[in-house]
Image: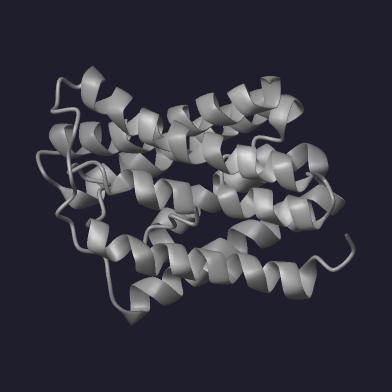
Amino acid sequence: MKPYIAEFIGSALLLAIVAGSGYMGEILGSGNAAVALLGNSIATGVGLYVLIVLLGPISGAHLNPVVSLMFWRLGHLDFKKLVTYWACQFSGAMAGIYLTHLMFSLPILQTSTKPRTGLGIWVSELVSTLILLAVIRIGDKEAKERIPMLVACTVTAGYWFTSSTFFANPAVAVARSMTNTFVGIAPADVFGFVLAEILAGLIMLLIFCRNK
């Protein structure tokens, strides 16, 4: 059970870091979006580094359904473990959002009203997910010991050079629709994000992950 618990707790903590730092940045920055995004990106990158270093030896620290899909295709997971990882990642991500609301004394159940839609946003998510998966795939082959830093730096930079702010994770997209804070996404816009992320995952599977 250790890998599943690690994926659940890791996903929960990741979303708590994302949502909590976004909310804190917005409050301390008095609504200044640049300040909020700066705090949000730094906290997420640093938090990811810690999570991957600590949980990597236990579960691989996927914390992302498309990352698990890629490693399933490469033969690192069987199908049963893949599905269980997905369940842990989605449920953990939602738990992390609820935990954030509890920590900041916000209403536990929320729905985001923040629109994130349009061709540019969808292309951004496709590119973001492809970049993330490529960094992990190449890192796994060429620089395994540096993956935590590679992923952390990629995500931190991605916040700033993509219009979608680098979700690159279906569990994150779904969970963020459940918070009406700085990092939220309107539920109606989640489908476009998840579709772009899954498409990127399929591209990786079909073109770059042939040697199962």
Q: Residue furthest front?
A: 80
Which quadrant of the structure image shows residue 148? top right
Which quadrant of the structure image shows residue 76? top right
Q: Position of residue 169 (x, y in %)?
A: 49, 53
Q: Is residue 79 visible?
A: yes
- In the rendered structure, the answer to whether residue 27 lies left or right of residue 144 reads left
**Which residue sits at x=27%, y=49%?**
177
Q: Is residue 163 visible?
A: no
* Residue 179 to residue 34: above or below: above
Nearer to me, 37 or 63: 63
**Which residue sits at x=78%, y=70%?**
208
Q: Position of residue 131 (x, y in %)?
A: 60, 63
Nearer to me, 166 or 193: 193
Q: Position of residue 192 (x, y in %)?
A: 37, 69
- Could you tell me which quadrant the N terminus lies in? top right
- Could you tell me which quadrant the C terminus lies in? bottom right
**Which residue sits at x=15%, y=20%?**
105
* Residue 103 to residue 47: above or below: above
- In the rendered structure, the answer to whether residue 144 lies left or right of residue 14 reads right
Q: How is the image coloured?
A: one colour
* Residue 16 to residue 146: above or below: above
**Which residue sits at x=14%, y=34%?**
27
